[in-house]
Image (cartoon, rainbow, N blue to C red):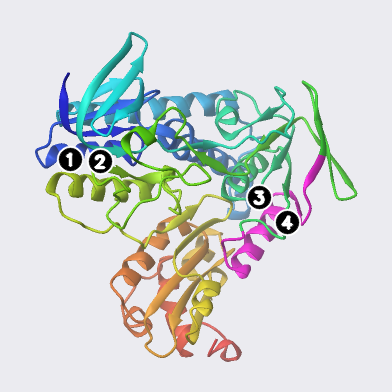
């Protein structure tokens, strides 16, 4: 039986970086993958979604180009070409990951991994089952979509993975779930002319965001894209045929050609037999870890979506994977990063990092907030993209930055500066006194700092001291 210093189960954004980092540190490493290298993020999540969104956003902007003085005549798209480009992007990136694993001497096993014991793992693939030894193991099996039992089985009802395989969009789309995934798909489809209805049984969409950010994105979805957003009641009496899906939300009847179910994700632990390694799952099937990413069994680590309480984001998994590998090989106890930015590719985009305004207030300290609207920013006006704002949340007593949120053009890129500032424990004064290039969107962070201190020259006096 071949034995490795480190065996990684799952080659997604948590798994393959863990394998490569362990190999860089001199360990003999194996990685087990039952499907395709890159995991959910690359093959049926982040990358395909954002590739399609890029095409949809460009089509939408071209269709409105007359606002910038450009006449293009009739504008059309072929969704099957969007899908073909998406598949090509995935193929290239997948090949890149496999090449990196090979270049770093990582042995790739194709099949499903299952613990025989703490130090033995069975791999079941197309050619049967083999066993390998593992001194240390990193579980990075990720998550998949939840499809609850009350949803009828129909070709007209899809999860996000199946939706990404479509070669043609429906004329109308019902989306069950107003979270990040549901809202991103809603914006994509609406930008391409699909009649979209979003149903969220909570009082509002994307409840993890501050109220002002939710209000802005919902307004844009409804007013700019024509999306119908129904909140505060569940979707009931669901029926489906091969051509339509129907249901009721409170007293309102809803119908569409197709329904996308996006009401959450569950950890992939079925068949993993973690109990044979002495690792326990919680009541929802997740694995609990310590600050160093180790589980209740010291030689077994877990990273990414399979971890209890973790942020289900690819870059969070990558950060954890790197730390887990270093701890497994070097036998130290580095802590995983806790400051993790989140990016939401709706229209407009959203970026958040650190404490939200609501969370900051719940700590009991006095909070100061500074917001600056893109409508008052020269670069945003020049681009013709003035919807949204950036917002700093700070400790009023110490002036230290605690959190930031951005909604508007390139918000998913802009949030990186805020993340660096918060991690470096900078103050509002330091950000406000840092010269930002003009005209750029990033100036908004400097301006928001000035707003917080009441000395912004680019907002009316009545708005000072917010």
Quarter of the N terminus within the rendering: top left
**Badge number at residue 178:** 3
Spatial CA span between label 1 and label 2:
6 Å
Q: Mark 1 vs mark 3: give the one in front.
A: 1
Which residue is labeled 4 in the image?
Answer: 223
Q: CA distance from mark 4 to mark 2?
A: 44 Å
> How far apart, in angstroms, are the residues tagged by discs 1 and 3?
38 Å
Mark 1 vs mark 3: which is more N-terminal?
Answer: 1
First reached walking from the N terminus: tag 4 or tag 2: 2
Q: Secondary structure at mark 3?
A: loop
Residue 317 spot, x, y in % from top left: 36, 46
Quarter of the image holding residue 447? bottom left
Q: Are marks 1 and 4 in contact (CB under 8 Å)?
A: no
Mark 2, secondary structure of its residue: helix
Viewed as shown, does residue 375 lie left or right of 335?
Answer: right
Q: Check whether the beta carbons of the residues at disc 4 and disc 2 lie within 8 A of each other.
A: no
**Marking on residue 18:** 2
Q: Residue at x 47, y 65 (%)?
A: 379
The answer for how far apart the CA atoms under marks 1 and 4 are is 50 Å
Q: Quick one: SS at disc 1?
A: helix
Q: Which residue is mark 1?
A: 22
Work out how far the residue at label 3 is from the one at label 2, CA to CA, in angstroms: 32 Å
**Residue 222 sits inside the magenta stretch:** yes
Residue drawn at x 37%, y 88% as measured from the top left: 398
Foreground tag (1 vs 4): 1
Q: Are marks 1 and 2 in contact (CB under 8 Å)?
A: yes
Q: Nearer the viewer, residue 25 or 148?
A: 148
242 in the magenta segment: no
Q: Where residue 371 sits: x, y (%)?
A: 52, 76
Q: Please provide the residue range marked out in magenta.
A: 207-236
């Amino acid at each position: 039986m071949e034995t490795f210093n480190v065996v990684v189960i799952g080659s997604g954004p948590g798994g393959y970086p863990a394998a490569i980092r362990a190999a860089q540190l001199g360990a003999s490493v194996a990685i087990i993958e039952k499907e395709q290298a890159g995991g959910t993020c690359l093959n049926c999540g982040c990358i395909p979604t954002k590739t399609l969104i890029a095409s949809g956003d460009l089509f939408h902007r071209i269709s409105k180009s007359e606002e910038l003085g450009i006449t293009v005549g009739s504008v059309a798209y072929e969704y099957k070409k969007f899908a073909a480009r998406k598949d090509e992007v995935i193929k290239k990136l997948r090949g890149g990951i496999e090449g990196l694993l090979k270049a770093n001497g990582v042995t790739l096993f194709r099949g499903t991994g299952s613990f025989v014991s703490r130090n033995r793992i069975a791999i079941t693939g197309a050619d049967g089952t083999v066993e390998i030894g593992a001194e240390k193991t990193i579980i990075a099996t990720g998550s998949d979509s939840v499809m609850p039992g009350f949803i009828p089985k129909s070709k007209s009802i899809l999860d996000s993975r199946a939706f990404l395989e479509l070669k043609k969009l429906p004329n109308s789309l019902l989306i069950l779930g107003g979270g990040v995934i549901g809202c991103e798909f809603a914006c994509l489809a609406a930008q391409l002319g699909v009649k979209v209805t979003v149903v969220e049984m909570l009082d509002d969409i994307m409840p993890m965001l501050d109220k002002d950010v939710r209000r802005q994105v919902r307004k844009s979805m409804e007013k700019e894209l024509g999306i119908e957003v129904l909140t505060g009641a569940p979707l009931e009496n669901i029926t489906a045929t091969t051509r339509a899906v129907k249901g009721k939300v409170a007293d309102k009847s809803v119908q569409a050609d197709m329904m996308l179910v996006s009401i959450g994700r569950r950890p992939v632990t079925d068949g993993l037999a973690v109990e044979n390694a002495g690792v326990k799952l919680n009541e929802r099937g997740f694995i609990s870890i310590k600050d160093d990413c180790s589980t209740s069994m010291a030689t077994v680590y877990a990273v990414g979506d399979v971890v209890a309480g973790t942020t289900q984001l690819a870059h969070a998994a990558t950060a954890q994977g790197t730390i887990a590998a270093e701890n497994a090989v070097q036998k130290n106890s580095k802590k995983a990063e806790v400051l993790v930015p989140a990016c939401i590719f709706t229209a407009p985009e959203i970026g958040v990092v650190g404490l939200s305004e609501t969370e900051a207030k719940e700590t009991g300290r006095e909070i100061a907030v500074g917001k600056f609207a893109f409508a008052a920013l020269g670069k945003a006006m020049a681009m013709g993209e003035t919807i949204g704002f950036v917002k700093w949340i700070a400790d009023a007593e110490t002036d230290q930055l605690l959190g930031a949120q951005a909604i508007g053009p390139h918000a998913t890129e802009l949030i990186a500066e805020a993340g660096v500032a918060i991690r470096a424990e900078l103050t509002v004064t330091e950000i406000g006194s840092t010269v930002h290039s003009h005209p750029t969107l990033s100036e908004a962070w400097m301006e928001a700092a000035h707003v917080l201190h009441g000395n912004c020259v680019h907002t009316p006096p009545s708005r000072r001291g917010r």
